[in-house]
Amino acid sequence: MAAIAGSAFVQPLLEGMPARLFACTPSRLATFTDCPRRYRMTYLDRPAPGKGPPWAHNSVGAAVHTALKQWWDLPPARRTPPSAGALLDAVWLRDGFRDDAQCDQWRASAREWLIRYVSDLDPAEEPPGVERTVAATTLRLALSGRVDRIDRRGEELVVVDYKTGRWVPDEDDARGSQALAMYVLGARRTFHAQCRRVELHHVPTGTIAAFEHSEESLARHVGRAEDTAVDIVTATAAVGAGGSREEAFPPRTGGHCGWCDVRRHCPEGQRAAPAREPWAALRP
């Protein structure tokens, strides 16, 4: 039976003193929200359960993100559309595809997306952050995360997140993204500059979904994140006190179970949805 890894919860240092901040990333909080059992297996169980096969859509996304990062690392004179295509070819991943033909088809499609996307960028711009780790604290959280890109527009910063999946994001997605809201706080603290606007850039279509946060909307995201942290703290403390791991971290089943990396260790998830093929999330 796997053991729960060391102290992952907040506790007061001395009576009357404030609790230690809960260190986390937006991804960690989202994993618990999606499924407490998957959170436990991913972050707490040691040894960690083995994961399933790689996903083709993750390979596509990772290659596009890496190529864009390397494109911005080039001298401005070399930031051309053809160079973006060449960078993608060099970093392309072949994991998760049905066969070589499908892999090569998707590489060609992703190359076209990327060339079209960078054609609309100004190569002379120097974003303050590219694949930049930012951090911020709240009353209960020590947050950190890596932002795809941080632009400077006038006196303000803009958080940019690349998307490569088949779902084309809209304003509701930008507004509702807890990760983007947390990145706003991190950008403010890291760069000591105003930041309100977040953008989801859908590379395949060139669609940009944007939202400008108010202090109230950011506070709502922070409140939900802190509530999630409290739930994680409570569950981990219960296990630490001898409680049942299954009761403290129950599965949250649904259609998403077909995509879960740890479904082979979860009977409830296996019953909830059939396993997806590794290439099933690729756009038609």
Image: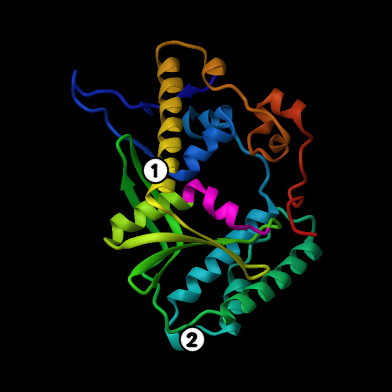
Image: 19 above or below 55: above
| Image: magenta residue range | 168-179
Q: How far apart in space, not on screen, are marks 2 and 1 (Cα)? A: 42 Å
Labelled pair 2, 1 in contact (Cβ < 8 Å):
no
Residue 96 place in picture, x, y as percent: 71, 53
Query: Mark 2 sits on what residue?
Result: 78
At x 52%, y 79%, the residue is 121
Q: Is residue 260 above or below residue 116?
A: above
Q: Nearer the viewer, residue 203 or 270?
A: 203
The circle drawn on residue 162 is none
Residue farthest along the bottom direction in this orientation: 77
| Residue at (32% x, 34% y) in the render | 140
Q: Which of the two marks, 2 or 1, is nearer to us in this view?
A: 1
- Relative placement, left or right, of 156 versus 131 is left
Mark 2 Cα shell of 10 Å, populated few (<14), some (14-19), many (≥20): some
Q: Residues within 10 Å of mark 1 (few under 14, many from 20)?
A: few
- Amino acid type, label 1: Ala
Give the structural element (helix, strand or loop) at label 2.
helix
Residue 184 picture quarter: bottom left
Asked where in the image residue 271 lies, by quadrant, the reply is top right
Q: Which mark is residue 219?
A: 1
In the rendered image, the quadrant that contains the C terminus is bottom right
